[in-house]
Structures are given as structure tokens and as C-alpha cells.
Image (cartoon, helix red, strand yellow):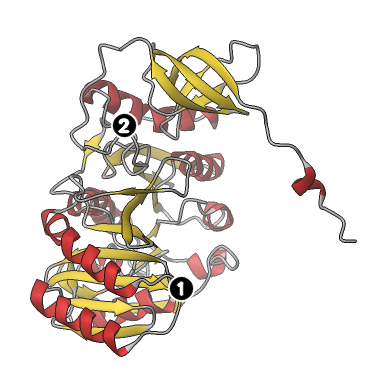
Amino acid sequence: MKRRSRSSSRPPTPQRELTVTARAIGARGDSLCPDPDGGAVIFVPGLLPGETGKIAASGERGQLTERLTTSDERIAPFCSVAQMCGGCSLQHWQGDAYRAWKRSLVVDALEREGLAADVLPLVDAGGSGRRRISLHARKMGHRLLMGFAERASERIVDIEDCPVAEPRIRAAIPALRELATALLTPKVDTATISVTATQAGLDVFVTRKGQLTLDDRLTGGELLARENWARLTIGHELIAEAAAPVVSFGKAKVAAPPGGFLQATDAGEAALAGVVMDALAMALKRAPKPARGVIDLYAGSGAFALRMASMSPVKAVEGEAAPLAALDHAARHTPGLKPVEILQRDLALEPLSIRELEGAAMVVVDPPRAGARAQMEQLAGSGVPVIVSISCNPSTFARDAAILVRAGYAMGQVTPVDQFVHTAHLECAAVFTKG
């Protein structure tokens, strides 16, 4: 007889019906509610500070069943599914209070690391809307669900529109539903559709299981032609490309790989690039003549490297081959750029050494959410005079900043950039100098 694992035999956490009052909003956008039974804090989405509500609590998570009081800071969400959709968890919060809280995410993270910093006002980088989104699609009998996952759930909130998306993406949602309907079957019933707004049109990338059929290819090609999409890729197969789906990074035009990373908004990218380019101008003035250019770590498709190449030779380091190839192609086909050297390396496993960093006038670090602890430890001992740290996670940003500060670097002003408006996601950037 097969023995049941200890985890599978554990009884589910009993649910409790409670009345709670929200104390604050936590770092992930949920309200922090003291447990009236004397337990730990309960995380409850949907309540604002000071509001009281009835919840169904299971462990440290709570589901709001009825709001009993209403804060003066509560406003009506502009999206019809905002209360269910996990994409925008804070549309119901008045703007000034929301912005103060979001800036505080950086301030609090730095204070936890013992760092005192000049945190600038929050930069509103919503721009014209998010230029990339990923939609989950599921076929349920004859019904199609397509949208975003609910908060802390795998259930899909079905949408007909996404008001925070760039207008071209919003207009394409009916056609994307048509594409999902054609591609999904009772046997292949789920897919993810990633859409990026580029200068040439929408770049649509579908991931799903199963082999493509001739009908899949014909339907995809017809939709691309009818809707004027730039490119359609399903899995590893390019279905059709009407025009190269390029975006501009300074002088360079880059066709990123299907589903490739791009800052969420044009305005967000511009704000972060502004910090980088201002730092580069300063670094080049300070650099001794033998300095051998700048290094861009976690370079992606070149949002910063290709801009910096207008002023200095650049070494771009990235772990994934496809975005690095796009960066390299753009660098070699853009007149007027300084030399761009590329290096593929997983920096989490093999950070650039102190010897490899030696002589650089400046280093830019833009890691994923987990941060760049190993690389920062090498940078801390390198003596590189200027380091720009960019992060999408205030906690790991502060942890990595502390490594540099302990090594004698001075931290400049911190710029918080809000390109995922109405959510807990936040970018931040700061310049560190030494010597």
C-alpha cells in the first residue's frame, strides 16, 4: 500500500469568520489587519487603512466578505473588474494617499537596512498605458475565459477591455479573443498570450501545449493581416511577420525576441534611462583617460546599453541569448554608436569578477526581482567610480545598496518610478559614487 505523504495528510487550515480593521497597506498591496484573536497580522485585499470589514480568514490570508466602514480615501475604480482582477489591486485608493504609500515602500526598505537616503517624489510613469501585457486564456466547454488571474488565485477574470493598457492593445482584445478561441480545444485548453505594442504594430506571442495545425497557422496569418499586427509567434514557430516589431533605444531600433522583456511603459523606460544617462555624463567627466568605457549588467535587449553607446564604448552582459542577439544586431546596424561588446553569462551564477570590472568608468546593474547580491559583492570591492543600481523590488534594491554603502560608496538620490500604476510593483534607481 502506498503511504500518504505527511503534507497530503495534513488537514486544511480551518476558516474563521472575523471582523477586522485595516491598520496599513503592506508591501504587496494587501491591507494589514491585526488578528482580533491575538494571532499574527492577517493580509486582506480590498480594505483601505482605517476601514473595517468582515472576512473569511484562513491562516494569514483573509477574504473580504463585507466592508462595514468606508475611508475618505476610497474612490470608485475606473475598471469594471478591478475588485476581482489581480492586475490592479489599488484602483480604489485616492491618488495622493496611494502615491505617498508607494514612495514609502522604498523609504521603509532602505530604513530596514539602516540606510538614510534622499528619496525623490514618486515619478508617475503610467504614460499612455502599459505597452506589454500577458493574458491567460482557458477554454471551458464552449466558453472562453481570457484575462488576468484573480488576486492570490489561478482563477481567470474574464475581460473585454483593459483600461490601463496602451490604446492599440485595448483595441486588439476582441481579435485576441478570436485567436484564443481558434487555438484552444478541449484537449489543449489553456494558453498565455503576450502582447507588446511596438512602432510597427503589435507583437503577439502565444505559448500553449500541443502541435500546431494547418488551421492554426491559417487563422493566425489571417488575423495578423486583418488586424495589421507586426508579428505573430506561436510557441517556437513564427506564423507571420508583416514588419519588424521594433522599439527605439536612443538612436537604435531593436526587434526584441517574441515575449522578450521591455519596460512596461515608454514613460517608465524614459525615466530610468534619464538617470542612467545623467550618471554617464558625470562618470565620463570624472573618468581617467585610460578608463575603458562602461558595463551594462543584465542588459536585456539594450534599453540602456544602446543609449550609452552614443557616448561611450559599452560592454553588455546578459544571460539569455535571444535578447543579446537583438542588442548585438541593433548595435552593428546603427550608425554613430561607439563599439558595443556583448557577453552571454548568467550573472547570478558567475558574476563579473573584480578583475573583469577593473577600469570601467561606470557600471549599470538592472537585475530581476531577486536582486544581484553576488554581483554587488564583486562591485563593492572593484573600485568602479560610478555604479547605477536599478531595481523592480525595493527590498532587494535596499539589500544590494547596503553592500555598496558598507564598502564606502556614497548613495545619491533615489528615484522611485511608478510604471505599474495602481499596483504594488515599483521601480527605483540610484547612483553610487566612490573616490
Q: Quadrant of residue 255?
A: bottom left
Residue at point 69%, 36% (across, down): 12
Asked whether residue 138 is in view, the answer is yes
Q: Amino acid at mark 1?
A: Lys
Q: How many marks?
A: 2
Q: Position of residue 227 (x, y in %)?
A: 10, 72
Residue contact at pointers 2 and 1, CB within 8 angstroms: no
- Badge nearest the viewer, 2 or 1: 1
Q: Residues within 10 Å of mark 1 (few under 14, many from 20)?
A: few
Tell me the residue that label 2 is attached to.
Answer: 90
Q: Nearer the viewer, residue 338 or 213?
A: 213
Q: Quadrant of residue 138?
A: bottom left
Q: Is residue 239 above or below residue 304?
A: below
Residue at point 28%, 73% (across, down): 182
* Residue sticking out furthest to the front: 142
Mark number displayed over residue 187: 1
Viewed as shown, does residue 320 lie left or right of 179? right
Q: Nearer the viewer, residue 243 or 275?
A: 243
Residue at point 55%, 65% (across, down): 351
Callout 2: SS: loop
Mark 2 and mark 1 lie on one chain; the one further toward the N terminus is 2
Q: Amino acid at mark 2?
A: Leu
Q: Position of residue 42 (x, y in %)?
A: 55, 23
Q: Is residue 195 above or below residue 218?
A: above
